[in-house]
Amino acid sequence: MNDQVSSPNCAACIRDGSRGDECSGALARQGLIRVNWDCWDRCNLDCPFCFRSRAEPVSTENAVALIGALAFGGITHLTLTGGDPSLRADLGKIVSTGHSYGQRVEVLTNAHYQSEAVLQALCASDLVGLSLDGATEQAHDEFREKKGNFRKVQALMDLLDDRGQPYVVRTVVSALNRDEPRDLATLLWPRRQLRRWVLLQFSPIEDGFHVREQYELREAEFDEICADARRAFDGAKAEFSVLSDREKVGLYLFLDPSGRAFCRVSDPLDGQLPIIGEPLHEHLSDIASPLHFDSTAHRRRYHDWFKGK
């Protein structure tokens, strides 16, 4: 049973006692249905291309308030990212809070830490997100620079298949692993609970900005790799989707671990995304009004993201 939580509300409206009508549904009126929250900035992997944001994570109390504010703003899909959410001790509480506010919750994890509490939280979520960037132990572990991670991901997929828990696999496609997607298609094809396989073009954001010359891939080459993988994945039960770096611009609303909001409205010159507001401290209507993103592309990509459960 989900823990009881207070009614969702805008934190600034609670503080000021005003503007509730303006803030209620303010994010949804801009076309947003989903938010990606880097709920934990620590990680047990150290991928050179990582684009996670870094900030001090909020407390459990403020996490509940943040999720409530997002729900008040009309967000119905909550994706928990990192760092790695598995390292957050209150992950189960965060998942149940999202559900208490009527949200669908996806938890992304690198699968390296699999305590019983983490597994319970993953299986309580609506969808688990996993990363697999090579079709062999050597290829994946070298790409992620963490020995043994390939086996951890495989073991977690086995467990999720056995428990009937839907999951998505994301593959970052770069100049270093351009030959892996075709073989990954064969590896993933028979997975029973796999709902979607996503190929993501490497993005030169955050840490990735500093290694971009090593990882960047021309879009035409990315498209060719994806077409080849699509042919190899043909007939699988899972959905197949592609996201180029260009298509990521204006697609997401991000939150960093402290709850600050970011949106990639262009390619930042230094790889750092601009802060557009703080839902724990500002009125949601103030954050939503200058928000620039492609609401049509956002809804087209995410309206049926949880298809199958």
Image (spheres, rainbow, N blue to C red):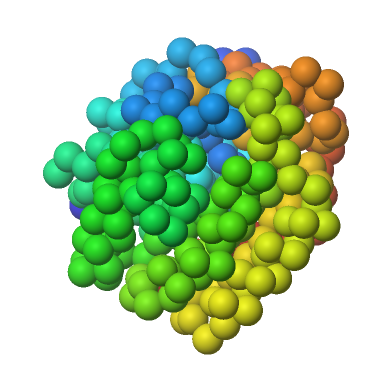
Quarter of the image for residue 277 reads top right
Pick whichever, 209 or 1, lies toward us. 209
In this rendering, position of residue 148 left or right of residue 285: left
In this rendering, position of residue 65 left or right of residue 221: left
Pick whichever, 247 or 152, lies toward us. 152
Instruction: Write the residue at 71% across / 30% down.
Output: 212
Residue 37 lies, with reference to residue 241, above or below; the image says above
Instruction: Write the residue at 75% across / 65% down.
Output: 224
Residue 259 in sight: no
Q: Residue furthest left?
A: 116
x and y percent of residue 208 in the render? 64, 29
In this rendering, position of residue 115 left or right of residue 229: left
x and y percent of residue 218 in the render? 80, 48
Which quarter shows the C terminus?
bottom left
Instruction: Write the residue at 30% across / 57% down.
Output: 154
x and y percent of residue 6 in the render? 39, 35
Pick whichever, 140 or 160, lies toward us. 140
In this rendering, position of residue 192 left or right of residue 185: left
